[in-house]
Image (spheres, rainbow, N blue to C red):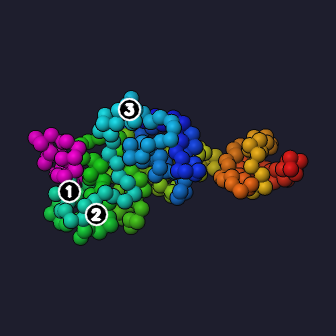
Amino acid sequence: MIEIKDLCKLYGDKKALNRVTFDVREGEILGFLGPNGAGKTTTMNIITGFVSATSGKVMIDGHDILEEPSLAKKLIGYLPEQPPLYLDMTVLEYLRFISDLKKVPRSIREKQIHEIMSLVKLSDASKRMIHNLSKGYRQRVGLAQALIGKPKILIFDEPTVGLDPKQIIEIRMLLKLLSKEHTIIMSSHIISEIQAICDRVVIINAGRIVAIDTPVELSKRLSDQSKLSIMLGSTDNDIEQALRSVSGVSNVIMLRSDNGISQFELTADSKLDVRRDVFFLMAKNS
């Protein structure tokens, strides 16, 4: 349904995304997990066509987001972290406005709006001004606008941020329900949030994909691994490959490299202490 290949994004000298590659299968809920600043929102903005990539390709159900933007965007409903709401409108006025933008046929517009309001439990607030709504209700309005036009793909950036526990459970249940008819990407920086509802998880850190697997398999892998962070007074490109050669090290990520200093994060077998081997390797190559 969605194919992302070698996605890179530069902001000046900063590389926000570095060769990001993954796919999203039809009908699944894909969790996009990573710390704040990892590149989740940038990736989503590129997938939805809000931002262009420096290089790489995004295909939406066979349509290139850059070469066929109208066809690709028509398939997507997007809820950013901050819902794009007009606070001086009522809920119903706003959803009618979104329907106009998405060119929903007038013959089905009102019926679709009321079905969506019922689905996200907004019917009782349809005539209320959006600026009078609580955070939870505003989030529901954001979800409703993403559903207008019944797109095949739904992309939600941190959909439960700032909500109370009851509202979080309601959103989770709604996403499970929506997955019966839609393909969903949901981002979060909370692993328990992703584990609760997602079929697969993509983990991103410092603009790079570090893992792709099911929540169950990732939990197994992480329980058998430890992390080691090191800083070196060198920016030699061969260092990363040398670190990968250390017995027990399964992955190496360069977190930053500037002013003659490089910082790496090593993933290693938790049963092995690789610090001694790493130290002597670096001493040998210094």
Please state if 232 lies on the left or on the right of 112 as rendered. Answer: right
Q: Residue 123 is drawn in which quadrant?
A: bottom left
Q: CA distance from mark 1 to mark 3?
A: 30 Å
Please state if 92 lies on the left or on the right of 279 as rendered. Answer: left
Above or below, comparing residue 79 to residue 135 in the picture: above
Span shown in magenta:
96-119
Amino acid type of disc 1? Tyr
Please state if 271 lies on the left or on the right of 152 as rendered. Answer: right
Amino acid type of disc 3? Glu
Evaluate whether residue 246 shows in this view.
Answer: yes
Q: Is residue 103 magenta?
A: yes
Q: CA distance from mark 1 to mark 2?
A: 14 Å
Position of the N terminus by quadrant? top left
Evaluate whether residue 118 shows in this view.
Answer: no
Q: Which residue is mark 1?
A: 94
- Identify the main secondary structure in magenta: helix
The residue located at (21%, 65%) in the rendering is: 88
Disc 2 versus disc 3: nearer the observer: 3
**Closer to the camera in the image, 11 or 170:** 11
The residue located at (35%, 56%) in the rendering is: 171
- Give the label on residue 67, or none: 3
Work out which residue is located at the far left of the displayed protein and give it. 107
**SS for tag 2?**
helix
**SS for tag 1?**
helix
**Closer to the camera in the image, 53 or 88:** 53
Q: Which residue is mark 2?
A: 137
- Callouts 1 and 3 close, C-beta under 8 Å: no
Q: Residue 136 is drawn in which quadrant?
A: bottom left
Q: Position of residue 233 (x, y in %)?
A: 78, 55
**Closer to the camera in the image, 197 or 151:** 151
**1 or 2: tag closer to the N-terminus:** 1
Q: Is residue 267 magenta?
A: no
